[in-house]
Amino acid sequence: MNTLIYLIPIALLLGGLGLAAFLWALRSGQYEDLDGASWRVLDDGDGKPQK
């Protein structure tokens, strides 16, 4: 029972840190361009136009 005194605040702190990281990612625009990364994977990057 004494371990719950330590585990509950630690769990709440970690949950709050996860929520803060998620909100930071939303505000900084991490989820704005979801299709760009998939197109960059297919780009070979040589800069020449394809024929």
Image (cartoon, rainbow, N blue to C red):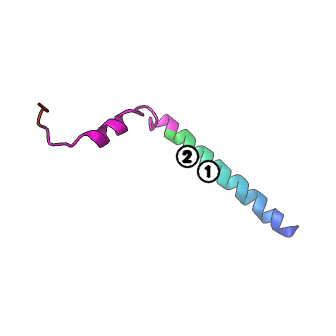
Name the residue at 24% across, 40% down.
Answer: 43
Q: Is residue 23 left or right of residue 42?
A: right
Q: Position of residue 27 (x, y in %)?
A: 50, 35
Q: Is residue 26 above or below residue 10?
A: above
> The disc labelled 2 sits on which kind of residue?
Ala
Name the residue at 14% across, 38% down.
Answer: 47
Looking at the rendered structure, the secondary structure element under dot 1 is: helix
Q: Is residue 38 above or below residue 6?
A: above
Q: Crowding near pointer 1: few (<14 within 10 Å), some, many (20+)?
A: few
Q: Is 41 one of the magenta-colored residues?
A: yes
Real-space CA distance between mark 1 and mark 2, rounded to the nearest whole angstrom:
6 Å
CB atoms of marks 1 and 2 within 8 Å: yes
Looking at the rendered structure, the secondary structure element under dot 2 is: helix
| Quarter of the view holding residue 1 | bottom right
Name the residue at 31% across, 42% down.
Answer: 41
| Quarter of the view holding residue 4 | bottom right
> The disc labelled 1 sits on which kind of residue?
Leu
Question: Which residue is denoted by mark 1 in the rendering?
Answer: 17
Quadrant including the C terminus: top left
Q: Position of residue 19 (x, y in %)?
A: 62, 44
Magenta stretch?
26-47
Of residue 48 and residue 2, the one placed in the foreground of this image is: 48
Q: For the view shown, which residue lies furthest in the front direction?
A: 51
Question: Which residue is denoted by mark 2 in the rendering?
Answer: 21
Q: Position of residue 48 (x, y in %)?
A: 11, 36
Q: Is residue 9 above or below residue 28?
A: below
